[in-house]
Image (cartoon, helix red, strand yellow):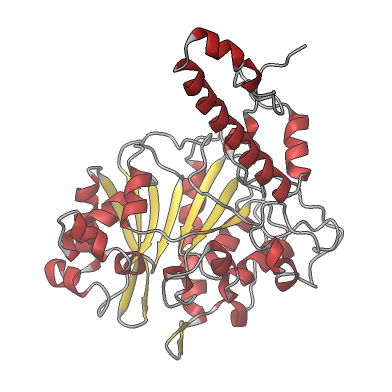
Amino acid sequence: MSASPELVLPEHEFTYLAGSTDRPWSHFIGRWNAMKPHLGQMLKDCDTDRPLRIVDLGSCTGFFSLQAAHHHPEADVVGVEGSIGIGNGTVGMVGSAQQILATDAVQTHIRWIQRLRLTNCFVAPEVWDYTSVCELASHGRPICDVQFLLSVVHHIDGVSVDQYAKKGLSRVEGFVDLMGKLLLLAPRHFVELPNRPWLENTYSVYGTQREILEAATKASGVSWNFKGPIYTAEWFGLRELWVLEAAAPMSPVDVETCPFPRLYRGQSQGDGGTTPHRDDLLGDAGFETMIKDVGADSNWMAPSCTPGLTFACPHLGGIDVDPGLMLLKEPYAPAEAKIGEALSAAPTALLVAHLKLRDAVSEATDLLREVRSSMPCDDALSHAALQPRPVMGQFAATG
């Protein structure tokens, strides 16, 4: 595979503020240049018989997600953004996925996904906390091949304090366990911790960023190899960028399941960007006009999925449908291609209405069974008319 040309992104769109202070643009370029050769080797070392997946936790404007997706079309890149920190406000503390998607940072990310025609780059608008990370780790398999944890974990720590207490953990114990669980989500990580005043209690116990990471690796129960720091920068104290790789192979990524409830890439470009993907939560809120990129090529017809994504994760590429909709008829065989095409083309409202109808019919059927089973035989026969009619393949067809 030939090397991709360098991706030059405009500084004014991708820096972010901490109070009144921009994080220097040189920190973005410097970190990426340090990460790039390591990331390339990591992906070469992965099993190429399946789609690869990178997760950029706390992706903000998407600088690192866009760079990774541009240079590695063989990988699906998911930027998880919850808007609970400095770079993209705190909408995620009380808001919804809609509101996270409407933030300036996520709009920038999606706009550049479209402009660069990156069919392998997505945004997951969701808040990760201690409970959700524990749930992801509980499955015993990584969710991605490589994870970016760049100045983000202290924000997750900030929304997890009550959850630590409910588990009987101190602030320091909770953070170390959180970090250990995050490490279990991938066999390869790029980790940048903040310095004081963030994680003050943890620094008081462990002293240095390396020692904090050492404690996290012990909490994970997995042996890890350290490289670095591969980059350092002064921004509210010294920040070190470390590479952590599992010393022994971890279980393979389960590419047939998707850990992300919703993924977005913006609207289809076949009509100049005026039609949102069917699954876009903001379609009814006019979000398609908010993120329309006049600089995008209106002749680009974005495919519904990147090659391999249909296998890797049916949600990716704008498919965000209740999996039960794919199983309308027993036995539960894979859906035919034409069914998938019809689902992609169907309006969201129609799909939701069908799911509600299907659930209502199922509940009514169960209730009627209970009523009939509690009746004497003669009474049950007299109520045979209560048998529901089949609906859209859910019940066996009658003559």
Q: Quadrant of the C terminus?
A: top right
> Relative to residue 154, is residue 16 depicted above or below?
below
* Residue at 62% across, 41% down: 356
Residue 111: x %, y % from top left: 68, 68
Between residues 90 and 122, which one lies in front from this camera angle?
A: 90
Q: Answer with left or right where residue 203 lies relative to residue 312.
A: left
Give the quadrant of residue 139: top left
Residue 12: x %, y % from top left: 61, 83
* Residue at 50% across, 65% down: 59
Q: Residue furthest top?
A: 377
Q: Quadrant of the N terminus?
A: top right
Q: Answer with left or right where residue 50 lies relative to residue 396.
A: left
* Residue at 62% across, 22% down: 386
Between residues 318 and 321, which one lies in front from this camera angle?
A: 321
> Relative to residue 352, is residue 232 depicted above or below?
below
Q: Answer with left or right where residue 383 lies relative to residue 251.
A: right
Q: Answer with left or right where residue 281 lies relative to residue 177.
A: right
* Residue at 59% across, 36% down: 360
Residue 69: x %, y % from top left: 60, 55
Between residues 42 and 302, which one lies in front from this camera angle?
A: 302
The answer to whether residue 117 is visible is yes
The answer to whether residue 49 is visible is no
Between residues 370 and 106, which one lies in front from this camera angle?
A: 370
